[in-house]
Amino acid sequence: MNRRTVVAGAVLALFVSSPAFSQNLPKEMSWTAYDTGSSGFNIAVAIGQQFKQKFGSDVRVLPSGNDTGRLAPIKANRAVISQMGIGTYFAQEGVFEFGARSWGPQASRLLMAATACNGLSIAVAKDTGAKEVKDLKGKRLAVVVGSPALTQGAISLLAFANLGEKDVTLVQFSSNNAMWKGFINNEADIALTSTISGQAREADSSPRGVVFPPMPADDKEGWARVHKKAPYFVAHKATCGVGGLSPQAPITMASYAYPIFMTYADRPTDAIYTITKAMIDAYDDYKAGAPGADGMALSLQNFTWVVPYHDGAIRAFKEKGVWTDAAQKHNDSLVKRQQVMQEAWKAYAANGPSDDKAFAEGWMKARAAALQKAGMDVIFE
């Protein structure tokens, strides 16, 4: 641990150890989010503006184009929370980039997440002529290095039409913004995105245009294939965003809550309680501050999803009367799943092979064995 990490941790500890902190937000906070222009970044900024106006707290939003870049400041205690995508789940599971020796399964914890009128699915350049997921065979799929959320998510959704990675050509980019520049410049044809992201809007107004292939909820076999690879996706009737979406012209496609406001389990309960409570109480002031921010409503929170909530957030939910015994039981089961993987990681990493590739492959086997022994779904094999 370097001196900067120690100092940052001490600063956060000072905030949360003060009696006043349980009643007031700190004067300054750092959060992380997707690149500038993304819907997650815009929502974070909208909330931060209200934190400043209502509570006198300055929120600095640090953008990063990949999951590990967003989580690293949280892990090092240089930021309090992150506006993540499904990388929150991958981090918990210790897979993809999080299966590397420097990471492992993380103790991810939720605060709140946005579920709005938008979808979060695969966008396709309109000039390709593709209209359904099955039409994507042979097309170029944009992926971001270091962002399994974008890569795995898009590949999982191809399974709806029984397609896989071998059926498309992967085109790698260094960040989310770089990916969309490549999409507009005809370097790729497919990308995972929110229907309301700034990048999707820019692509839609470009000569290429954007469409979102439908994924009907009644296609049980298609959704079963998706859920085998990505249980976090749900069928959602999207009514806002690019591609001609409106309440009068909805499209059922994939989605999950985004952005996902998360932190680590060991962050002080008082700190996370205060932040979560402020997000709930300031909702009416920021809900129109960015597209999708209205999805942060307390009534739209999913308390039985795939990642557990932080104890501080749970305290805030209990105060509002929305946390149930069923939610607590589900949360406890998710915490147990994390503990199984973390114990397996500790045992494996102590004597894992020195070669990085062999280490990652060996970890996935150890992870699967531990989950199977505990009677839990492996998901990633």
Image: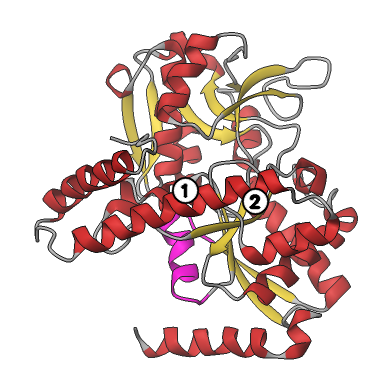
Magenta residues (range): 63-78
Does 74 appear in magenta? yes
Residue 271 in view of the camera: yes
Q: Nearer the viewer, residue 216 or 200?
A: 216
The amino acid beneath tag 2 is Gln
Q: Residues within 10 Å of mark 2 (few under 14, many from 20)?
A: some
Q: Position of residue 336 (x, y in %)?
A: 46, 53
Question: Which picture quadrant has residue 162?
Answer: top left
Q: Which residue is mark 2?
A: 328
Residue depicted at x 84% and y 75%: 55
Q: Position of residue 35 (x, y in %)?
A: 55, 53
Type of colouring? secondary structure
Q: Position of residue 43 (x, y in %)?
A: 71, 53
Q: Nearer the viewer, residue 39 or 186?
A: 39
The amino acid beneath tag 1 is Gly
Q: Position of residue 183 (x, y in %)?
A: 47, 32
Residue depicted at x 49% and y 31%: 231
Image quarter of the C terminus: top left
Q: Which residue is mark 1?
A: 87
Residue depicted at x 45% and y 45%: 178
Q: Relative to 166, is 244 on the left or the right?
A: right
